Amino acid sequence: MIEAGKKAAITRKTANYTLEEHLEVLNEDLKTLFNEVRTFVNKVTFQMLPEKYINPFTDFGFKKLFGEEPNKDLLMNFLNTLLPHPYQISDLSYTKTEHLGSTPTDRKAIFDLYCVSPSGERFIVEVQKAKQNFFKDRSVYYSTFPIQEQAQQGDWDYKLAPVFTVGILDFVFAEDKDDHTVLHLVQLKDQYCKVFYEKLTFIYLAMPNFEKTEEELETLQDKWLYVFKHLPKLQQRPQRLQEKVFDKLFQVAEIAKFDKEEREAYQESMKYYRDLKNVTDTAFDEGIQKNQVEIVLNMIQEGVPIDLIAKYMKIPMEKVKEIIQQNSSLDV
């Protein structure tokens, strides 16, 4: 404390204080208060800043980063952090994303990205922005298209190239709400959990479950997931993301470098993303509330006291009484 006072006194002579020198002469409580205020101010200031980088969960953002030929090295690098070792890729060719059924009445499938490696492996890469009923069913249905297109006329031994479906999800499956796993790798297995068919693989990334901070990033996969989760919130490239591949990513993602047409397309895509999220999140919240009411009513009919209902449901007692009043036909 004496040394800090001497240092501050010397600095006063030149009227050139640093912030750290001011803090050195404060007591611990004032230091803590100051740091809390500084953190709050920085957070508010950050929230007021315009987005610097695109949101990869928008259609435009995802395809800008990963769906253009000059940027396919970004897609390959990302996919290689997810794929089993034998299937690491060194090149990809983009192919058409719209696939028609075998007859005019069959439904079509439109993928976000569809790529083929030189050795024939097929990769469907999809971003799913909001909860969707039967998303797993849709994934299985979509995977049949790259399987069927491998059929050959004439004599054919039915040998197939591997098919991978990669889903980057901005939500968690309802059945997995208590599971905090980020990466789900799914294959067809027998009753002994032995892989029965290794050429059909589904990889799902439940992004809300990824909670690592910048300081906790270790693997390249960690860093890619961090980019997906935080890119539109960043104002500068994080120190941990020093790999060469991120040099290019942050250049491609910078909104200020877009031309007028690209900016307008991105804004339109962003508007759609926000509208979709708002609608689905509202519907999900309403579904929770409806389920909550049904449970409360069932407990009332079973004669459970309202104070216990409030306790077990973790809702205010006034809320329980409100539900009872809205369903006054019940004999409670």
Image (cartoon, rainbow, N blue to C red):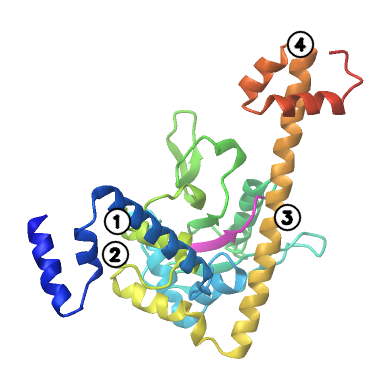
Q: Is 131 located above or below residue 328 in the figure?
A: below
- Which residue is depicted at the point 74% across and 16% down? 299
Mark 4 or mark 1: name the one nearer the start of the chain: 1
Query: Where residue 254 sits in the image (x, y, percent)?
Result: 47, 79
Give the residue number, with chain letter if any, for mark 2.
Answer: 240
- Which residue is depicted at the point 56% across and 68% down? 113
Q: Quadrant of the C terminus?
A: top right
> CA separation, marks 3 and 1?
34 Å
Left or right of 179 on screen, residue 214: left
Disc 4 marks a residue whose amino acid type is: Glu
> CA separation, marks 2 and 3?
35 Å
Disc 2 marks a residue whose amino acid type is: Arg
Disc 1, SS: helix
Labelled pair 1, 2 in contact (Cβ < 8 Å): yes
Observer able to see residue 202: no
For disc 4, the neighbor class at 10 Å (few under 14, some 14 to 19, many from 20) is few
For disc 2, the neighbor class at 10 Å (few under 14, some 14 to 19, many from 20) is few
Give the residue number, with chain letter if any, for mark 4.
Answer: 302
- Which residue is depicted at the point 77% across and 16% down? 300
Give the residue number, with chain letter if any, for mark 3.
Answer: 279
Q: Which residues are magenta?
A: 121-131
Disc 4 or disc 2, which is closer to the eye? 4
Give the residue number, with chain letter if any, for mark 1.
Answer: 215
Disc 2, SS: loop
